Image: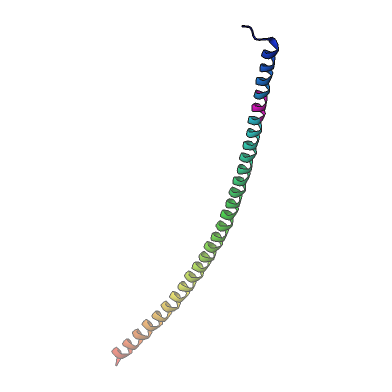
């Protein structure tokens, strides 16, 4: 039994229409996914930029602390050297005084 041409043509048109709608639906879904991925990429880029800025700020703060500690260390080293010199002068003076006193006792 032959199917009339009109039925075959109508059936093909319906299949074509369904395929077109499915292609449009898939295309729309892909657009939504693409947009969503772009938003995620933008959000990640923003987070990375924020972390990089925070890291740079923390690094700068730590560098300032290191510089302050180095300055304090230098000041303490200088103060220690000065105190050491002063003590050495006192020791030298006491040594001289003791030697003089011993010489005076020996002469008596």
Q: Looking at this view, is 23 or 15 the one in front?
A: 15
76 versus 32 height, above or below: below
The residue depicted at 51 percent of the width and 64 percent of the height is 70
Q: Is residue 65 magenta?
A: no
Applied colour scheme: rainbow
The residue depicted at 58 percent of the width and 54 percent of the height is 56
State the image coordinates of residue 82 (x, y, percent, origin top left). 47, 74
Q: Looking at this view, is 50 or 18 the one in front?
A: 18
State the image coordinates of residue 29 (x, y, percent, origin top left). 63, 34
The residue depicted at 41 percent of the width and 82 percent of the height is 93
64 versus 84 height, above or below: above
Left or right: residue 31 versus residue 69 is right
State the image coordinates of residue 15 (x, y, percent, origin top left). 65, 20
Q: Which residues are magenta?
A: 19-24
State the image coordinates of residue 77 (x, y, percent, origin top left). 47, 69
Quadrant containing the N terminus is top right
């Amino acid at each position: 039994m032959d199917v009339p041409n009109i039925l075959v043509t109508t059936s093909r048109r319906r299949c074509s229409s369904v395929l077109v709608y499915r292609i449009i639906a898939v295309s729309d879904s892909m657009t939504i996914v693409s947009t969503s991925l772009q938003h995620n990429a933008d959000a990640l880029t923003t987070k990375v930029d924020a972390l990089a800025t925070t890291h740079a700020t923390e690094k700068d703060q730590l560098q300032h602390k290191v510089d302050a500690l180095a300055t304090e260390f230098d000041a303490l080293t200088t103060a220690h050297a000065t105190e050491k010199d002063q003590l050495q002068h006192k020791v030298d003076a006491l040594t001289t005084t003791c030697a003089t006193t011993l010489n005076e006792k020996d002469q008596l």
